Amino acid sequence: MKLVLPDGADVCGARVLLHACCAPCSSSVVECMLQNGMQPAVYFCNPNIFPLEEYEIRKEELKRFLSESHVPYFEDKYDHAAWLECVNGLEDEPERGARCQKCFYLRMKRTAAYASRNGFKFFTTTLSSSRWKSHDQIVEAGNMAAALYPGVIFWTQNWRKGGLQQRRAELLREKNFYNQLYCGCEFSLKAMENRVKK
């Protein structure tokens, strides 16, 4: 898959901050970036993940993959209480509903802030690799976050296209990744458990 950065910037050698939710979703994206001569750095900003044990498992699995790929890793503070306050009143929203939009914006805002502080012109997210997420919601959240930080651009790449979803599945098997069955928060966990019961 050939990558094209916003504003016609040169892909080869470009530093891009990649917000990542987990190792499986990051794998094909990071591989694609490296194959295109980019210099990705990964930012783990996921205060939505619950419980803490799940957060730690996903974090360590991502770090394992990035270590093998020689890709820099950075981590945001885990503050689930702040995330709960952000989505207060939206607990019963379905996947792709208003709760997800608020969640995306919180995480993209923190990623954009990190990009601004650390000299990254572009940032993007592995959330766009999931077929369970709304790409439109992600793009809206990313662009709103970027608007807060002059000089920072949200790269609206849809990471499910160009064969990357199939490659994700291949890497999942090849690297024996831990693969979660819910997006991360307790509300999606409850929805997943209800689906299993049915």
Image (cartoon, rainbow, N blue to C red):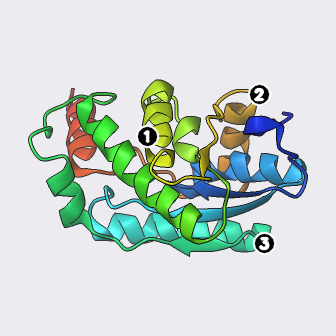
Q: Is residue 183 visible?
A: no
Please report whichever mark, 1 or 3, sits nearer to the chain's N-terminal start: 3
Give the numbered dot on residue 162: 2
Give the numbered dot on residue 144: 1
Q: Are marks 3 and 2 in contact (CB under 8 Å)?
A: no
Kindly state the secondary structure of the residue where label 1 is placed.
helix
Judge the density around disc 2: few (<14), some (14-19), many (≥20) Cα neighbours within 10 Å: few
Picture quadrant where residue 162 is located: top right
**Residue at position x 49%, y 68% in the image:** 59
Comparing 7 with 31, the one in front is 7
Kindly state the secondary structure of the residue where label 3 is placed.
loop
Residue that badge 3 annotates:
70
Which kind of residue does numbered mark 2 sit on? Gly
Judge the density around disc 3: few (<14), some (14-19), many (≥20) Cα neighbours within 10 Å: few
Please report whichever mark, 1 or 2, sits nearer to the chain's N-terminal start: 1
Which kind of residue does numbered mark 3 sit on? His
Q: CA distance from mark 3 to mark 2?
A: 24 Å
**Residue at position x 66%, y 39% in the image:** 169
Which kind of residue does numbered mark 1 sit on? Met
Q: Is residue 151 visible?
A: yes
Relative side of 82 to 26, left or right: left
Q: CA distance from mark 1 to mark 3?
A: 31 Å
Picture quadrant where residue 119 is located: bottom right
Q: CA distance from mark 1 to mark 2?
A: 26 Å
Give the mark toward the camera: 1 or 3: 1
